[in-house]
Amino acid sequence: MVALALRTLRHRAGGSAASFLALLFGATVLMAFASMLDVAIAGDARGSARETLVLMATVVGGWGLMLVVLAVVSTLTLAVRQRAAETALLKSLGATPARLARAIVGEAAVLALLAGALAVVPGVLAGRGLLALLHSTDQVPEDIGYTFGPLAPVMGIGIVLVAAVLAALVTARRTTRGPVVESINDAETGRTRMSKKRMVAAGLFLALGVDLAVVTATVMRDEAEAAIATAGQADILASIGLALLAPVLVRRAVGLLAGPLRLAGVAGELAAAGLRRRTGQAAAVVTPIVLFTGIGIGTLYMQATENAAAKAAGTAAAAEQENVQTLNLVVIGMIVAFTALMVVNTLIAATAHRRREFGQQRLAGATPGQVLGAAAVEGTVLALVGLACGTVASLFTIMPFGSVRGGSVVPEGGPWIYLGMAAVAFALTLGTALGATRRALRTPAVVAVAAS
């Protein structure tokens, strides 16, 4: 099965690209922040400098782990679903679920190790940049130099390997069990039933988000720095909770929008049918959009409110806040960049697999323009669902922090922050969907149907 896993990766390199890129970027981020522990030890940091370095490595590294797990679970689930016919064939030839699971886990482990090895160089560069930022904001003394010791690669490679194996185990258990015919039908339709474990996990993350929001609005009312810490985590937890509910949310949204979509003509009809048949794949695309918008909108508005509060407190507080702002924006920027990569990765992987579907639509009479129009409508719906969920998640941070630091649940910053994040989300989603669809349409319809 190990040999089978290696052969599968070699012959299906394109299908594994999304998972590989998620692991590569995740390992890079984790190594960059984990190297701050090496800096703290080798540079003999003391006091607040040591606290800053350890905090950067542990807190941000912990959130990075969660995001890597979510990204790998999403992309691996999509990749394995797209190989339903192959899995069914192996089952019919006598392969047991345990052997199939070992092959899937083996593929994930190979990808994780390769991604971890290739992430060392960009991890070093990102770590140097992070320490330079800490120097420039006076968080760490200039005499403490950069060190990329054993902790960074061990943590980076180890965490992505564990995340990949856990994600593969979850995916394999879900995919390999059940009769062959049922597995094929589920994969073809893309329907996804929410498991009880996933529902419980979603409820837990949402409950933790609510808890931190309440703590921010009550206990931390007179503690500005502590309020930033609790409020900043609230929207991350809420975003993860809503992202876990993506299959249910997409199914409900498609049910509500099916009628209005048909008013858009053939493109709307095709989009409604595609979303209804492929809610599982659609949910995989919505997940990173929720994370991207929820974390980005919440953090940017929180920072704008904090900036206004510091400015009102006086010049000294404003100057200190400027350093904190630079650090916060870079940290959250790395997380948002990772989730943006997830959006692009997942959309490309999901759309590239639909060549046969697009070919069938064209053979049935749809023009390439109508197929592209349907992709645009689908992308718009998915972006709207993701933005709506992300907006709700961001309120877990915006409202309690605004009431504590700004005296109002309405944050500072005006509407432009929200409109900017929404525009980026729509641009990423629609641009990637249209680009991948246009590329898929280059294959003649008859060839696409026959080759799939």
Image: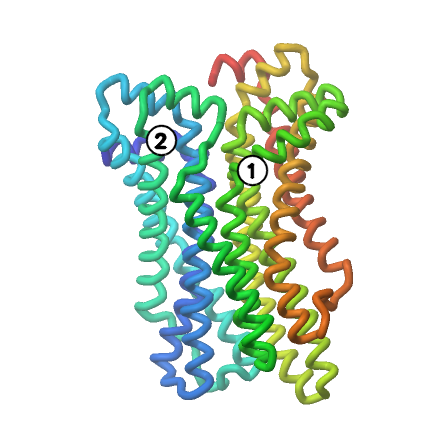
Task: Left or right? Give the position of 317 relative to 89.
Answer: right
Q: Classify the position of the N terminus by image quarter.
A: top left
Q: Residue 412, percent across and down?
A: 74, 68
First in residue order: circle 1 vs circle 2: 2
Disc 1 marks which residue?
Answer: 347
- Residue type at numbered disc 1: Leu
Answer whether labels 1 and 2 touch (C-beta < 8 Å): no
Q: Residue 143, percent across and down?
A: 46, 86
Q: Residue 410, percent across and down?
A: 73, 65
Q: Is residue 138 above or below residue 69?
A: below
Mark identifier at residue 175: 2
Q: Which picture quadrant has residue 249?
A: top right
Give the structural element (helix, strand or loop) at label 2.
helix
Identify the residue shown where x is 62% and y is 11%: 363
Give the structural element (helix, strand or loop) at label 1.
helix
Q: Is residue 369 visible?
A: no
Q: Is residue 30 visible?
A: yes
Identify the residue shown where x is 65% and y is 64%: 398
449 or 176: nearer the eye? 176
Task: Left or right? Give the position of 293 relative to 418.
Answer: left
Mark identifier at residue 205: none
Q: Which picture quadrant has residue 171?
A: top left
138 or 174: nearer the eye? 174
| Circle 2 crowding by C-alpha within 10 Å: few under 14, some 14–19, many from 20 | many
Identify the residue shown where x is 31% and y is 41%: 169
Q: Is residue 28 above or below residue 443?
A: below
